[in-house]
Image: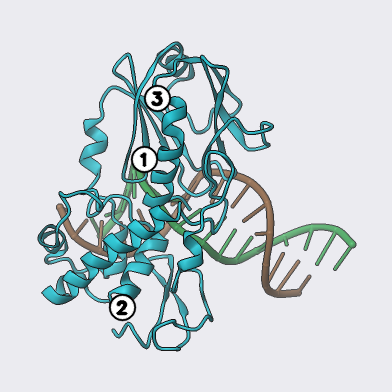
Chain colours: A cyan, B brown, C green
Amino acid sequence: MPELPEVETIKNELYGNVVGRHITSITIDDPKPVQNPLDEFTRGVSGQKIEELYRRGKYLIFKLSNKKYLIIHLRMTGAVLFNPGKVGKYARVIFGLDDDNEMVFTDRRRLGIIRLTDNIADLEKKLGPEPLESVFTPAVLAKRLQGRKAPIKAVLLDQKVIAGVGNMYADEALFASKIHPLRETGKLNKREIGRLYDAIVSVLKEAVANKGASVDTYQRPDGAKGTAHENFKVAHQRGAKCPRCGGKVERIVVRGRGTYLCPKCQKI
DNA sequence: CATTGTCCCTGGAAGC
DNA sequence: TGCTTCCAGGGACAAT
């Protein structure tokens, strides 16, 4: 499940291969992910130079020479492959580049989206601060959590609060800061928010360093897996021993999302 | 605005 | 063995 570290890794590993290249062909094997009318999409992308590539939250954004933005969200099972040996069963959209290389959007479950837009402000409005940039501080986090009644786990998943944190890293950050996922957000004290801040930053940084977590279908552009999941303390570790207290990692459901925790370390 | 529930989608797992 | 049902979850959207 691509979250910030996974999308960051894809961006990093794609960057040198695609920035500066022109998109010379588009093959749409499955129109489902494309949110624009197909002719408009094809016209807007064909022949354009990729001037920049960056990540915002869990979105991968290609800035094109016609000032439009090609936005990709991988949702659950999406991936962007660079020159895959053969075009797999789940290839949806194939971008041919002017150096004869190919960039392929694949998605087993077809929940991912691709959109071409000239209005990046709309996306910006939906997203909170980038947790690995200087705009994100303990004070900023405290302000965003202030007065909220929902459980902290649910709030961490809200992309308007912090961009890029998803189900796995929310669980890891809550474990690292010893906060129960069901704690009422607005009732966290300053010390807890400080710990949570540190945990979010360190958990994400470590996962980026390990090139993302391959718990499901996540793969890097060259098809390789990441290793961040090898360091997971609780996420997807039901029944495992808590590395801090030796207790048992449990799974509960919070707002319909599978949530892993050590109930001994993370008291309500 | 904050919050909660529903829907989308597929294939692997679990149940009968 | 083979069929059916359940489940995973990010974000759009609707309802409250």
How far separated are the C-alphas under marks 2 and 3? 43 Å
Determine if residue A2 is in view: yes
Q: What is the x, y in percent for residue A48?
A: 40, 14
Q: Residue visible at 30% across and 63% down?
A: A202
Q: What is the x, y in percent for residue A147?
A: 12, 67
Residue position for label 3: A19
Residue position for label 1: A59
Q: What is the x, y in percent for residue A115?
A: 40, 29
Depth order, front residue of C14/A266? A266
Q: Secondary structure at mark 3?
A: loop
Depth order, front residue of A42/A95? A95
The image quadrant where one finds the C terminus of chain A is bottom left
Q: Chain of mark 3?
A: A
Residue position for label 2: A180
Answer above or below: position of A98 versus B12: above
Task: Identify the image quadrant of residue A49.
Answer: top left
Label 2 vs label 3, nearer the camera: 3
Q: Residue visible at 67% across and 36% down?
A: A88
